[in-house]
Image (cartoon, grey):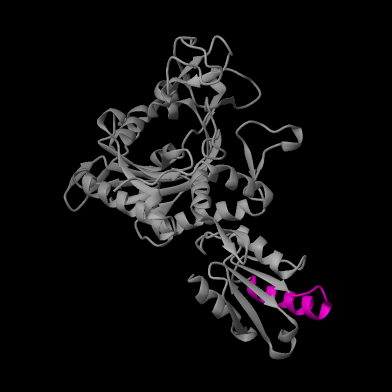
């Protein structure tokens, strides 16, 4: 079976939509912007939060064997020396001597030709470039005051292993999950919010008895792949790719990536890695603290192995947008719609009075107040109803509720479905239950 082809036109369509409808703005745009940094607007902040909430619901809320954590962003050098980041968290960097542009050598299609100016054999010798951001704590600069912005959220979960173990009374297998900001001084950020220097991660470290590591690795590969399918990503746009031996980190006995077919081709959404006992042993050695587990049933002491599913929240949000984007012909006009899963949709429901007349806007706002404790809602009384429907379609809002002149008399409203555009007449006293049933939440 042949693989589907990427759609290069989709990139510009989605980027334009995100700016026009308030999903994502270039950061500090009034000052000319700052490369590869973005602000999430009124709609984007809801979508990104929903992606993170859906991950947390699946990984923590619906499980009894995973606990949450929110570790600090700033860390001393000792943490990153123990983890290997100070020595090994590097990319090979080359400069073009003709146009002075910089590139990652391992990302060049042709290592002998500059993709910017086309000059041949113009690159400098490759040198390693550490991706971590370093800053200083306190008023005096110096090596004793160096701190780093974390390049990943994982290390805080390893350094808190004993704290969580002792306070939660869990025993392996169990996990620690975290959602938070990470920072990498990328040489070549790009593709909109896919690769940025400031981003959010959704990571979980699952600590298991060594003999069970292979079994849990297979489990988490399947579990994480299914999460994307359950939230509406089409199967043909996803794949689970096992790393070749030469791609594996020195401590990993297996790593697989959940990849999405972006407009530029297949690229990573999430990595699931069997990290062995490398991390706990490294921090135990460097800190002098024990990071192991004593099993009273077997009278055995061991260092747990770790299975790590690590996803990028921002790039996952982007993938859901691209998977949901659709253009279709409706009565001779093109309708742009985001078929977002209701759990991810920024607004679950929009309340739209048919006109601005007080006899409609007053009761419509009362209806809004009835719905807001249960769902994230939008309210719009500007432009004709058809244009308002189209706007909500572009926001991915699953349901629109129109309060019209008949509603004053029959105490019912019209509920329009985003995907089918079918309309139901629903009594006001049943509206909350109706919306909840339609959304399936």
Asked if one can make out residue 171 in the rendered structure from this viewpoint, the answer is no
Asked if one can make out residue 337 in the rendered structure from this viewpoint, the answer is yes
**Residue in front for this viewpoint, 386 or 68:** 386
Which residues lie in the magenta part?
A: 354-372
Residue 355, image x and y in percent?
Answer: 78, 74
Q: Quadrant of residue 63?
A: bottom left
Farthest right residue in view: 358
**360 part of magenta stretch:** yes
Residue 68 left/right relative to 307 = right
Rendered residue at 50%/17% (across/down): 114
Q: Quadrant of residue 59?
A: bottom left
Predominant secondary structure, magenta span? helix
**207 part of magenta stretch:** no
Q: Quadrant of residue 395?
A: bottom right
Residue 13 left/right relative to 93 = right
Rendered residue at 50%/56% (across/down): 53
Rendered residue at 58%/66% (across/down): 348
Farthest left residue in view: 298
């Amino acid at each position: 079976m042949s693989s589907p082809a990427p759609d290069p036109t989709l990139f510009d369509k989605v980027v334009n939509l995100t700016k026009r409808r308030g999903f994502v703005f270039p950061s500090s745009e009034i000052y000319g912007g700052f490369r590869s940094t973005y602000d999430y607007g009124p709609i984007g902040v809801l979508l990104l939060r929903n992606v993170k909430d859906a991950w947390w619901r699946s990984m923590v809320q619906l499980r009894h064997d995973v606990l949450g954590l929110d570790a600090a962003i700033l860390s001393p050098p000792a943490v990153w020396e123990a983890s290997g980041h100070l020595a090994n968290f590097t990319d090979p960097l080359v400069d073009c001597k003709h146009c002075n542009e910089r590139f990652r050598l391992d990302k060049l299609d042709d290592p002998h030709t500059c993709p910017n100016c086309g000059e041949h054999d113009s690159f400098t010798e490759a040198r390693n470039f550490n991706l971590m951001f370093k800053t200083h704590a306190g008023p005096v600069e110096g090596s004793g005051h160096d701190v780093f912005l974390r390049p990943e959220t994982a290390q805080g979960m390893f350094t808190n292993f004993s704290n969580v173990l002792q306070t939660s009374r869990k025993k392996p297998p169990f996990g620690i999950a975290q959602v938070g900001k990470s920072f990498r001084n990328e040489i070549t950020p790009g593709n909109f919010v896919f690769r940025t220097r400031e981003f959010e991660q959704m990571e979980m470290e699952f600590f298991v008895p060594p003999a069970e590591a292979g079994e849990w690795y297979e489990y988490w590969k399947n579990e994480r792949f299914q999460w994307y399918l359950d939230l509406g990503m089409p199967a043909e746009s996803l794949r689970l790719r096992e790393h070749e031996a030469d791609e594996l980190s020195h401590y990993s006995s297996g790593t697989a990536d959940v990849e999405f077919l972006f407009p530029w081709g297949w690229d990573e959404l999430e990595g699931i890695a069997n990290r062995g006992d490398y991390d706990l042993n490294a921090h135990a050695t460097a800190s002098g603290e024990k990071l192991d587990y004593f099993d009273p049933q077997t009278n055995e002491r061991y260092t747990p192995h770790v299975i790590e599913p690590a996803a990028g929240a921002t790039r996952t949000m982007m993938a859901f947008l691209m998977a949901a984007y659709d253009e279709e012909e409706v009565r001779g006009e093109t309708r742009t719609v985001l078929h977002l899963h209701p759990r991810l949709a920024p607004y679950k429901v929009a309340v739209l009075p048919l006109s601005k007349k007080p006899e409609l806007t007053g009761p419509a706002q009362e209806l809004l107040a009835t719905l807001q404790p249960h769902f994230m809602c939008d309210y719009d009384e500007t432009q004709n109803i058809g244009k308002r429907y189209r706007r909500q379609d572009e926001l991915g809002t699953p349901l629109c509720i129109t309060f019209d002149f008949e509603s004053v008399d029959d105490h019912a409203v019209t509920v329009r479905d985003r995907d089918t555009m079918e309309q139901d007449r629903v009594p006001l006293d049943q509206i909350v239950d109706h919306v909840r049933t339609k959304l399936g939440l």
